Amino acid sequence: MSVATGENPPRRARPGGGVVAGLSKACHPLPAAAVTAFATALAVAVGRGAAGAAVTGCAVAAGQLSVGWCNDRVDLRRDLATGRPDKPLAVGGVRPAAVTAAALAALLLCVPLSLVCGPLAGAAHLCGVGAAWAYNLRLKGTAASWLPYALAFGLLPAFVTLGLPGAPWPPLWLMAAAALLGAGAHFANVLPDIEDDLATGIRGLPQRLGARRSGALAGLLVLGSALAQVAGPPGPVTPYGLGLLAVTAATALLAAARPGGRIPFHATLVVAGADVALLLARGAGLR
């Protein structure tokens, strides 16, 4: 599976950089850490134990690292064309061969770490990681660009609960909430780069809709995720759930009003953190 070939070589690495520093910046560290923390916290909440939560976190971290490095490697030509100063590959902070090797090594490591959690759990996680790679390699520039995000995030709770004795599936409302959050994160994450993406031939669904409509849709998807979390479980809505809805509604308005910049994406991460707190409070009721 070839990632990309034929680009003009990036500028020479800056002094004082180094492979480790370049790789750490090229892996998309903030979303990778957020998704890993979410999965680890969920594993703790459902009773996977210290060892189970640790393996879950390591498997998700390996998958996220592979996806992040793959993304920057595939995007190298476009990042060079648009002069992205925040991309280590584009400014010569790390060599393309090092990023390619790191992405493949992380992907290979992800396989046994996922399967240690059980065959069904491992299959669910590897399917999600495969969807993310499919986004990087092909689907990013199509109208189905949202689908890998929804699939990968929706399967993440399944990876966690299927590793429990008896391999129980998570409740449908939890998978729906995660899928909606993932799709919303996709739209929010793309917002600052829509113009550059269009200039380099990327026409995913957010690029086709434009910044204004994509910002509004990002907010609605995240709000739908919060509604699924609050209304899905049996029993009355808690004060925390009402607060979560209020914060999410404010985030939706922010995404619609300020579609430029990273504010909508960072606000989505804040809502995701609030979602995790609610999941931790529910604990074993999630399985």
Image (spheres, helix red, strand yellow):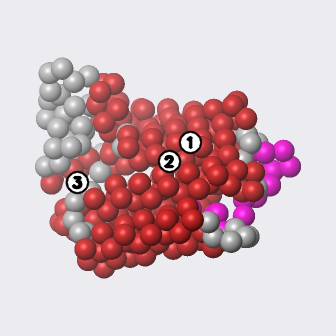
Residue occupying image coordinates x 34% and y 49%: 74
Left or right, 170 with respect to 239, comes to right
Looking at the rendered structure, the kind of residue marked 2 is: Val
The residues bearing labels 2 and 3 have C-alpha atoms spaced at a distance of 26 Å
Instruction: Report x, y in % for residue 253.
Output: 33, 73
Which residue is situated farthest in the front direction here?
239
Left or right, 271 with respect to 258, comes to right
Determine which residue is flagged by label 3: 78
Disc sitting over residue 174 in the figure: none
Residue occupying image coordinates x 42% and y 65%: 247
Q: Does residue 139 show up magenta in the picture?
A: no
- Residue 250 against residue 94 in the figure, above or below: below
Instruction: Report x, y in % for residue 226.
Output: 53, 68
Which of the two discs, 2 and 1, labels the residue nearer the N terminus? 2
Which of the two discs, 2 and 3, labels the residue nearer the N terminus? 2
Looking at the rendered structure, the kind of residue marked 1 is: Val
Q: Does residue 168 show up magenta in the picture?
A: yes
The residues bearing labels 1 and 3 have C-alpha atoms spaced at a distance of 27 Å
Labelled pair 2, 1 in contact (Cβ < 8 Å) = yes
The answer to whether residue 151 is seen in the rendering is no
Residue 136, picture quadrant: bottom left
Disc sitting over residue 35 in the figure: 2
Which residue is situated farthest in the right direction here?
166
Residue 53, picture quadrant: top right
Secondary structure at numbered mark 3 = helix
Q: Which residues are magenta?
A: 163-178
Determine which residue is flagged by label 1: 60
